[in-house]
Amino acid sequence: MRSVTESPTARASTGRSLAQPSGARSSTTRSEASPVDGAPVDGWTGFAERWWNVAPTVGPATPPLAVSDAYRMIAEASAPFRAGTRFHVLPDVRFGTAAGRIRAPGDLLPGAADPDPDSYRERVGAELAGQGWLLAVEQPLFGNFADWLRVRDSIDRLWRRVGFPVVPVGAELVFGTGMTRIDGLTRDSRHAVLAWVLRGRLEVRVDGAVRCRAGAGELAYWPAGLRYTETFADDCLALLLRVPSDSRLAVGAVHDTAVELAGDGPAADDVVPYLPVPPSEGPGPVPMADPLARAATAIAGLSAAADLTRTLRVRWAARVSAGALEPVPPPREPVQLSAGTRVRRVAEVVRIRAARSGWIWAVHGHAFAVRGAAWALLRRLPLGTPVRVADVCGSAGDSAPDPGGLALLTTLYRLRAIEVLAGPAGEKS
């Protein structure tokens, strides 16, 4: 990878619009360092040792998504937004031009007449008379397991070198041209950013003095705590991952979990009344309203409760198995398993101790509790080796498998940890 620098220039103004039109390309010179270890980013080792949490950089990297797959996800996410604005849903779709964000872009979003990114680019460019535009899709991955898994597998290799994030990593697909997004100037970023450029060109000005310029087949990275702008040019299509790096984000995650658990407790059964304001005369402070006092007591009690610790441990196991890439795709429908069915394990199972005799297992972002006997079943499921259900569940011959083992296998199938192969009697998954 390389560190890219330019002579200092004036910082852009800090607005709150989605994007602003980009200016002419800077004519300043750049100095480039040699690639780390003479190798591309894909292995992550040199990147993690030299650049992670150190400085912005750009280097060659195989994107985890093809252009066609990324555009398909953008088009699928855009379909319901063509009918009007939607709120508090994921994936979230935003469209902007030089005039700012368009709340209801309608036909400016991809539709049936736009089978590929070039068709869409030509149509939108004509409708907007050549002015810049930017289409951003927040959290586009969880709707398709294969897409999510490719990105998870790519980023998982980095986490194994630098450590797993304790709060979720956000994903975004961006498609646009001739636009500069200035959101990163409003305050210091709490997230580091990894940006794979699938096509076009991405330029990032960090703290007004350092520029990352990445083209197709390259990865741009800049650490947290920096102010930046992102310019999308030449019909840029990019996948951005925002990696949490601020301790306040972890505090917020614990707070949200405590509030969620408190919402299931007795204090949540209160009907919050309209209370008269206590008289100001008389000794002593004005008392807190009883429903608020009970809610505060419930949350305070949870800070030391086993339920909170247990829930955070479960979510941590799930997060590690997801590569922190959340939200995650839902489980698939179950399949009928019999003694003669052949299965093969295709995914790791994250295992974390839950209690003296119990464990938490997690696969692809989903966690569940098991007991010690499950270890024996997993040992009979070596990664990548076809085995019969009867051999895994401990039944003799073709007799009915053990019900507990069969239930665990079904769970592993639903979470895509195992695949069903053609059985001896011709049965298929």
Image: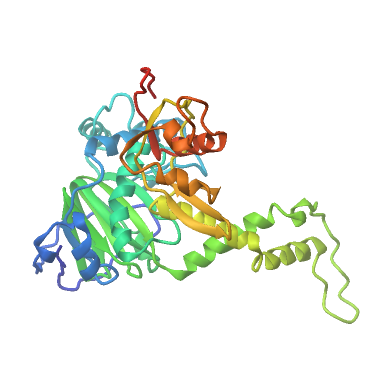
Q: 374 and 68: which one is in front?
A: 374
Q: 181 and 366: which one is in front?
A: 366
Residue 369 sits above or below residue 354 on the image? above
Q: Give the colouring mode of the picture.
A: rainbow
Residue reaching furthest to the right: 282
Question: Picture coordinates of residue 80 (x, y %)?
Answer: 44, 32
User: Residue placed at 64% from the left, 63% from the top?
Assistant: 306
Residue 164 sits above or below residue 394 on the image? below
Quarter of the image where one finds residue 53: bottom left
Classify residue 307 as left or right of residue 170: right
Classify residue 62 as left or right of residue 268: left
In the rendered image, the quadrant that contains the C terminus is: top left
User: Residue placed at 25% from the left, 32% from the top?
Assistant: 120
Question: Picture coordinates of residue 107 (x, y %)?
Answer: 36, 31
Classify residue 262 as left or right of residue 53: right
Residue 337 sits above or below residue 306 on the image? above
Q: 317 and 288: which one is in front?
A: 317
Residue reaching furthest to the top: 426
Residue reaching furthest to the front: 396
